[in-house]
Image: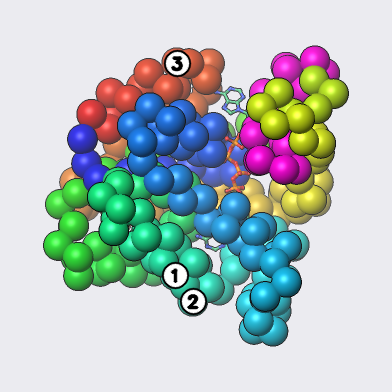
């Protein structure tokens, strides 16, 4: 199994759901740039330039590359130093980012340790899933839409179950525009050209996707 697993996919495709499963199964580090940005948002140590950069996120746009690299590269290095592989979840949204990450991995002689898996769903399904998504405000657990009515609090940590602030219809539509299938196409081509791209059908059950992801990465 490769040391660097990269998940691609439109908003709501299940990148986070599947990344958490791989991490639990194989002991990899989970690097979700969305989570890193949300943690930074809550931090009291945030620098003014970071605060300004985070504004884009509130509107469903991409935050500047420098902030993504600052957060993600540090997190990747910290896991590699501990001898752990990493699962990157949403960390790559443009060809420029894909290229920058490949250069970063090359500098560490890890360019042959990268496997890219896209979880494929149509944009219409992104809207459908994200308008229903509920998450734990404390641990980030993602609650399956069908399960949301069953829980008053998070089944893992008893935290409050909330709707993510960017999961409202107008912002979801903007995210689909900037990060949906049209935006992913050039990234797909970039990785296909490197011969490290695999895709799985994200429209199956969570367990079905999980089984296909495992086949793709092993
Ligand atoms: P981020 O938090 O990464 O948001 P996202 O890409 O929109 O992804 P999501 O977390 O919304 O969805 P997901 O694919 O993880 O799906 P999930 O597993 O939750 O990023 C937030 C923002 O940060 C971005 O908008 C951007 O501003 C910024 N950002 C982040 N990275 C960046 C970067 N590299 N560059 C620039 N800006 C960046 O599942 C969704 C729902 O579907 C859940 O309810 C789940 O239970 C359900 N579900 C999952 N799988 C299935 C299934 N098989 N069947 C039915 N339901 C399912």
> At 73% across and 17% down in the image, what residue appears?
147
The answer to whether 63 is drawn above or below residue 47 in the figure is above
Question: Disc 3 to disc 2, how far (Cα)?
Answer: 36 Å
| Stretch in magenta | 131-150
**Callout 2–callout 1 Cβ contact below 8 Å:** yes
> At 53% across and 73% down in the image, what residue appears?
67
Question: Disc 2 to disc 1, how far (Cα)?
Answer: 5 Å
Label 1 residue SS: helix
Q: Is residue 103 left or right of residue 204?
A: left
The residue carrying mark 3 is: 208
Chain-order first, disc 3 or disc 2:
2
The dot on residue 69 is 1
The answer to whether 55 is drawn above or below residue 60 in the figure is below
Q: Disc 3, ligand 1: is the CB inside 8 Å?
A: yes
The residue carrying mark 2 is: 66
| Quarter assignment of residue 135 | top right
Q: Which x, y percent locates residue 100? A: 33, 69
Q: Which x, y percent locates residue 41? A: 70, 65
Nearer to the camera, 115 or 181: 115
**Residue depth check, mark 1 versus mark 3: number of the one nearer the observer:** 1
Nearer to the camera, 143 or 171: 143
Q: Disc 1, ligand 1: is the CB inside 8 Å?
A: no
The answer to whether 14 is drawn above or below residue 10 in the figure is above
Question: Do we see residue 168 in this rendering?
Answer: yes
> At 21% across and 35% down in the image, what residue appears?
1
Question: Do we see residue 97 in this rendering?
Answer: no
10 Å neighbourhood of mark 2: few (<14), some, or many (≥20)?
few
The dot on residue 1 is none
């Amino acid at each position: 199994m490769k040391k660097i697993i990269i998940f691609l996919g439109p908003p709501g495709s299940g990148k986070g759901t599947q990344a958490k499963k791989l991490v639990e199964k194989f002991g990899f580090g989970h690097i979700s740039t969305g989570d890193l940005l949300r943690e930074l948002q809550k931090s009291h140590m945030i620098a003014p330039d970071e605060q300004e950069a985070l504004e884009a996120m509130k509107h469903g746009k991409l935050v500047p590359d420098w902030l993504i690299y600052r957060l993600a590269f540090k997190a990747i290095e910290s896991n590699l130093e501990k001898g752990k592989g990493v699962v990157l979840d949403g960390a790559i949204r443009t060809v420029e980012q894909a290229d920058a990450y490949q250069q970063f991995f090359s500098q560490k002689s890890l360019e042959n340790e990268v496997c890219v898996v896209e979880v494929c769903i149509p944009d219409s399904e992104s809207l459908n899933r994200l308008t229903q998504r509920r998450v734990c405000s404390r641990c980030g657990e993602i609650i399956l839409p069908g399960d949301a009515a069953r829980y008053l609090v998070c089944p893992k940590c008893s935290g409050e179950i909330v709707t993510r602030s960017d999961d409202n219809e107008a912002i979801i539509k903007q995210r689909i525009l900037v990060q949906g299938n049209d935006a992913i196409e050039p990234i797909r081509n970039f990785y296909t050209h490197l011969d490290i791209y695999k895709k799985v059908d994200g429209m199956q059950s969570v367990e079905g996707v999980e089984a296909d992801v495992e086949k793709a990465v092993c």
